[in-house]
Structure formats: C-alpha cells, structure tokens
Image: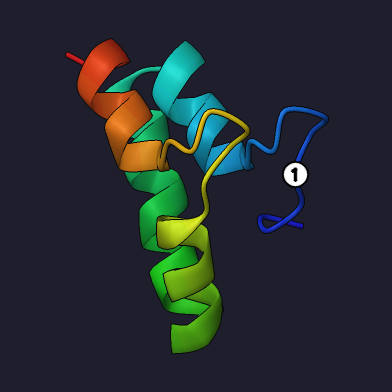
C-alpha cells in the first residue's frame, strides 16, 4: 500500500513530505524500514512523481 501512487505518481511518502510534519514523514520511514523488504524500501525512497521528484526532493521544499 505504501508503494501505491496517486494520479500524479506520488506515494504516501511524497504526500507526507508535502502536507504533513516531519514526524509523520519520519514515522512512515521508520515503519517502512521495520516492515518492508530492502527492495521495497528502496522503491519507496527512489520513487519519482510526475514531476520526477523523489519524496526527499519534495521534503526539502516543504518540511521544516
């Protein structure tokens, strides 16, 4: 489910980076590391949206 994307190619990680606080972003990352395979975590971290941005690039612009 974390790897699912919306119509703009964003994962839940992208959305957390854009709309929520750092705690939510970190919480999703921590959960993923504990519950997903290494390959799934890599896919989550490297996923790009329709603007070719990773969640970390989105986070750089929105999280503080």
Q: Is residue 39 above or below residue 57?
A: below
Q: Is residue 13 above or below residue 18?
A: below
At horizontal 49% and vertical 38% (from top left) the residue drawn is 52
Q: Position of residue 51 (x, y in %)?
A: 53, 28
Which residue was labeled with disc 1?
Answer: 5
Apparent side of residue 7 relative to residue 17 in the rendered image (left or right): right
Q: Image quadrant for the C terminus? A: top left
Q: Which residue is nearer to you in this view: 23 or 13? A: 13
Q: Is residue 48 left or right of residue 30?
A: right
Residue 37 in picture, x, y percent from top left: 52, 87
Q: Secondary structure at mark 1?
A: loop
Residue at 58% x, 37% y is 49
Q: Judge left or right: residue 19 versus residue 50.
A: left
The residue furthest left is: 64
Question: Residue at 68% across / 58% down in the picture?
Answer: 3
Residue 13 in picture, x, y percent from top left: 51, 41
Q: Nearer the viewer, residue 60 or 19?
A: 60
User: Residue visible at 41% across and 27% down?
Assistant: 17
Query: In x, y percent, where is residue 32?
Result: 48, 65
User: Tag 1: Cα neighbours inside 10 Å, few (<14), some, or many (≥20)?
Assistant: some
- Is the N terminus in the top left, top right, bottom left or bottom right quadrant? bottom right
């Amino acid at each position: 489910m974390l790897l699912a994307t919306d119509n703009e190619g964003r994962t839940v990680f992208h959305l957390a980076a854009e709309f929520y606080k750092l705690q939510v972003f970190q919480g999703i990352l921590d959960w993923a590391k504990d519950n997903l395979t290494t390959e799934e975590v890599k896919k989550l971290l490297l996923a790009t949206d329709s603007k070719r941005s990773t969640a970390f690039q989105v986070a750089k612009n929105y999280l503080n």
